[in-house]
Amino acid sequence: MKLRIRHIRYALILSILVSSLFGLTRADSVEAHGKELTLTVSSLIPDHSEPLRRMYRVRVAYSGDQDMVEGAEVVLTGTRREGGELLATQRLIELPGEPGIYVAEVVYDRFGEWELEIEVQAALGQGDGAANLVESVTPVVLSAADKTSLLTEADRVQRLQVFFAFEWWPDIATIAIRILHSMSGVIYAGVVGVVLLAAWIGGTGSRILTGRFGENFLLLTTLGLTGILLSGLYGAAFDAPNAAPGIYDYRDLLALPYGDAYFIAFILKPIGWVAMVIFALRIDAVVVKPAFDALDEPDIVAVGVPSGAADDTAQHGDVGASPSTDIQLKRLIGVGTALAAIAVADLAIVIYLHYLSHLGVFLPET
């Protein structure tokens, strides 16, 4: 009997050792759950007519062996970026028949960018995890193509030159340059207008042509033209619809709405400037120089001046004009009037297209 009991004890000890050895072997080959959880979050819009309504699906698994986590507590919270409004706490429920899958329907009270946080606590403290995401709740549900189009449009908007601060540079500097541009134009137009008017009325007007005003005609017009040129070169870089270097980066300008029309209208400015240079030289050759040349010939009688006034004309040095000179003068006045009208119209068009380009960038392209 004692021998039998002894054999039983040996068998039990042997079985315990074998079981322990087997258990250790199994422990090396089986991966434990651990307490870290992996969350996979997806959202969808169940009804596109209700863009404020979202459906969230969270898949919860252990990070170690990817076993699904059942019976966990899943909570969703959120904050709106724009105003800081808080989203009411949402508890997700586990889908029947799908362990580890939790869902909830969320209805936002406002559109905007919502920062969401999903926290998971496994049952009996067997693990926890969290996930953060940003949900863009917009009035219109966009497809992938629409989002790409909007991103392209946003890049186009960013190329606009928009100054939100009013500082010495470039804002006040740009205003000063515009004043210089306007004053230069007034100087040129005033000098040319006075000379043409003096030549037209004759008599007393001829004294203007042969006085200091006539002597400095080319100097005054050169000052006006120089101011127009320098301020125009600056404005082309810093006063165009696109950012600096402005019109010098014409490809960037042409990419803006109405950029091609603005470019064409702006090109008329340097063309007009060259025409103004030629026009000033022509006035000097046809009107100013002949008036000084006539001072050396006091016996010439002014055309259209009564014979009784000829002596007075010679005495004061007033100079008349020959029929050919009179025709040339009329042509110069006509050309000057046309140039002035074109310059004013082009300036108005450039300003209009400048603002239209800024407004058009926010309109959909057709």
Image: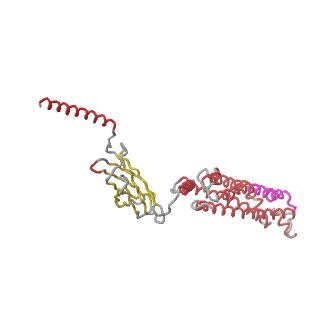
x then y, percent, for residue 238? 60, 53
Report the predominant secondary structure element of the magenta stretch. Answer: helix
Tell me if I can see residue 131 in this picture: yes
x then y, percent, for residue 362? 56, 61
Does 40 sit above or below residue 304? above
x then y, percent, for residue 6? 15, 30
Instruction: Specify whether 160 is left or right of 222.
Output: left
Q: Residue furthest front?
A: 1
Tell me if I can see residue 160 in this picture: no
Q: Residue at x 40, y 63 (%)?
A: 107
Numbered range of the magenta stretch: 276-300
Q: Quadrant of residue 8?
A: top left
Instruction: Specify whether 293 is left or right of 255.
Output: right
x then y, percent, for residue 59? 39, 51
Q: Does residue 288 show up magenta in the picture? A: yes
In which quadrant is the N terminus drawn? Answer: top left
Q: Does residue 289 show up magenta in the picture? A: yes
Q: Nearer the viewer, residue 88 or 173?
A: 88
Q: Residue at x 76, y 57 (%)?
A: 279
